[in-house]
Image (cartoon, coloured by chain):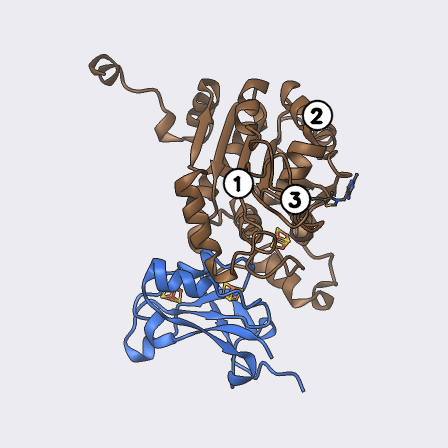
Chain colours: A brown, B blue
Amino acid sequence: MSLDYVKFAPGFEKFMPKEYRDMVEHGPFGKKTTVSQMGSFKEILEEHPMCAGCAMTLFIRLAMISFPNPEDTITVGTAGCGRLAISQAAIPFVYGNYGDQNGVASGLSRGLRLRFGDKPKDVVVMAGDGGTADIGFAQTLHSWIRKEKFTTIMLDNEVYGNTGGQESGMTSQGAVLKMAPLGKKFEKMDMVGMAKVAGCVYVATVVPNNPRRVEAVIKKAVLIAREVGPTYIQAYTSCNIEYAIPTDKVMEDAKNVEDNRYKFSEYISEEAKQYLAERYGYKEFLPKPAAAVTQA
Amino acid sequence: MYLVADIDVDICAQTSCKLCTQFCPEANTILYNNEIGKDKGYKYGAAYVAVDRCKGCAQCVWVCDNMAKHHAIKMIMIDQLPKAAITDNVTYGEKTTTAVLASPMVG
Ligand SMILES: Cc1ncc(C[n+]2csc(CCOP(=O)(O)OP(=O)(O)O)c2C)c(N)n1
Ligand code: SF4
Ligand code: SF4
Ligand code: SF4
């Protein structure tokens, strides 16, 4: 887990596939690559079997670019569509049994702290809404209540996409799905509210039709989880298959959903603001000069 | 046969706004070459598609039409592209890439 693990073993360079060589020589490791540079450096995400046009795929692609230190990051996932892509990136991926991801990440993040001390090693969980809010609900909530320091990202496509369209706790009330033909009877779960109550120090909702915002949110969440406490991002990542969205309308849908019911929101604790300002130079969180405070 | 995205260099090179790749779900697919179009007086280079990675979703078409409002991308049957960029022929450089175009058809 350092820059060394992506380098070639001496003498093996010429036997490595082109994609691997490109990644070592022109990938994001050890550099600060950003969303605005996309298309001009080799990304660490490789080809994968997720559906054409899937917004979850786009979100995962953006996430991989946004990790502050990809060479010091481990992703944790579980059953569901997302792992099909997350596992095809050049950063270590740990597969937790369905719903176990936040338990696995708790142990992993504690172990990394014991082994590496203050050197940051980032643990990022990315799992579906079913994995996070239904089957993994207890483990998700308990990791937050225990103040485990890692980032949880819910890939919220509002359905069990990988198994053909069952409703989840995150499906909207009334939604009719292939395996929920009568329509969902209950409201969408308020996981954002629960994250705050359970002690997450950073909570955000995003939609991938604003790539730079996704980048900013992921960077903050990962940095804060290094020292301050658990962080949670809930991302609307539509399933174009189960919701029958034509692939060329996926971004139009994202925009409509964002406008109507998935607005960008961000909660950040005072301690986390101070940490970002002092440690990582986030100007917007620097304490206001005394004059500005008295005027306000 | 199947559809892939094809970018009209003459339209794209006028701005090379770099929006489409930020919305393509596939990694390393819409790439930029900062040199394309310089021989015709354009300054910013242009986008192109590594067609072997394109899944044909047309999300980039929607983005170029509706967000960038440049209408530079069309979906085209892969056998109608005489030459195209494919991953094996892409070279990464400092903040740019280049591709030697080749027939995308195997055999
Ligand atoms: C313990 C266990 N129960 C059930 C399954 C079957 N299973 C695989 S993926 C999945 C649903 C995934 O839904 P979600 O977590 O919302 O992710 P999505 O596929 O929608 O991204 C289920 C029920 C499993 N793999 N393991
Ligand atoms: S089933 Fe839905 S969520 Fe899963 S890869 Fe396909 S479009 Fe994406
Ligand atoms: S959105 Fe259109 S104009 Fe902008 S870079 Fe892409 S193809 Fe070129
Ligand atoms: S059609 Fe889809 S996969 Fe192909 S380049 Fe456009 S956005 Fe990417």
Tell me, yes or no, whether dots 3 and 2 are on the same chain.
Answer: yes
Give how far apart the Cα atoms at labels 1 and 3 are.
Answer: 23 Å
| Amino acid type at mark 1 | Ala
**Residue A209: image x %, image y %?**
44, 49
Q: In this view, does A187 lie to the left or right of B48?
A: right
Tell me, yes or no, whether dots 1 and 2 are on the same chain.
Answer: yes
Could you say which disc has been placed on residue A138 in the image? 2
Q: Residue sitting at 70 percent across and 57 percent down?
A: A8
Could you say which disc has been placed on residue A180 in the image? 3
Which residue in the rendered view is the most extreme toward the left? A295
| Amino acid type at mark 3 | Ala
Give how far apart the Cα atoms at labels 3 and 2 are.
Answer: 24 Å
Mark 1 falls on what kind of element? strand
Q: In this view, does A162 lie to the left or right of A235?
A: right
Which chain is indicated by disc 2? A
Mark 3 falls on what kind of element? loop
Residue A109: image quadrant is top right
Comes first in the chain, label 1 or label 3: 3
**Residue A11: image x %, image y %?**
74, 63
